[in-house]
Amino acid sequence: MASAKVTQALRDALNELEAERARIEATIGNLRRVLADMGGGVRRGRPPGKVAAKPVAKTVVKPARNAARRRRGWSADSRNAAAARMKAYWAAKRKAAA
């Protein structure tokens, strides 16, 4: 019989906690709605900077994206030289570890 009393007590405690959680969640929802109505809702993203007057729509000509930001690749000779340097580097590391 003792285990039945313990089980019932645990169920009662669980029910009370769930009811309390429901009250807390309802209160949180109400507070969020009040904040949103006041304009102080949860702000996400980057903090605002100085607010400047928005410029009148004007046409901006941007250079071609690829032409302005294109990075030069390595030539075949440069790649081969770097590969040779790295092979020598790792060979030296293996030799020192052995």
Image: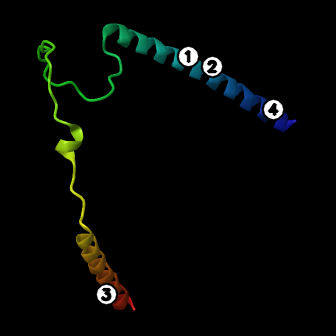
The colouring scheme, among rainbow, by chain, secondary structure or one colour, is rainbow
Q: Residues within 10 Å of mark 1 (few under 14, many from 20)?
A: few
Amino acid type, callout 2: Ala
Q: Which residue is mark 1?
A: 23
In percent of width and height, residue 71 lies at 21, 52
**Which residue position is annotated with label 2?**
19
Q: What residue lies at 56% left-to-right and 16% top-to-bottom?
A: 23
Q: Which numbered tag is attached to residue 13? A: none
Circles 2 and 4: CB distance less than 8 Å?
A: no
- Quadrant in the picture for residue 97: bottom left
Q: Callout 4, which amino acid? A: Lys
**Residue corresponding to mark 3:** 92
Q: Is residue 11 above or below residue 79?
A: above
Task: Assess whether mark 1 and mark 2 are in contact (beta carbons under 8 angstroms).
Answer: yes
Mark found first going from the N terminus, 4 or 3 = 4
22 left or right of 73 in image: right
Q: CA distance from mark 2 to mark 4?
A: 21 Å
| Residue at left offset 31%, top offset 11% | 39
Nearest to N terminus: mark 1 or mark 4? 4
| On-image quarter of the C terminus | bottom left
Mark 4 near mark 3, Cβ–Cβ under 8 Å? no
Q: In front: mark 1 or mark 4?
A: 1
- For badge 3, the amino acid type reads Ala
Relative to 75, residue 80 above or below:
below
Q: Position of residue 86 (x, y in %)?
A: 30, 77
x 22%, y 38%: residue: 65
Label 4 belongs to which residue? 5
User: Nearer the N terminus, badge 3 or badge 1?
Assistant: 1
**In this rendering, the label closer to the viewer, 3 or 2:** 3
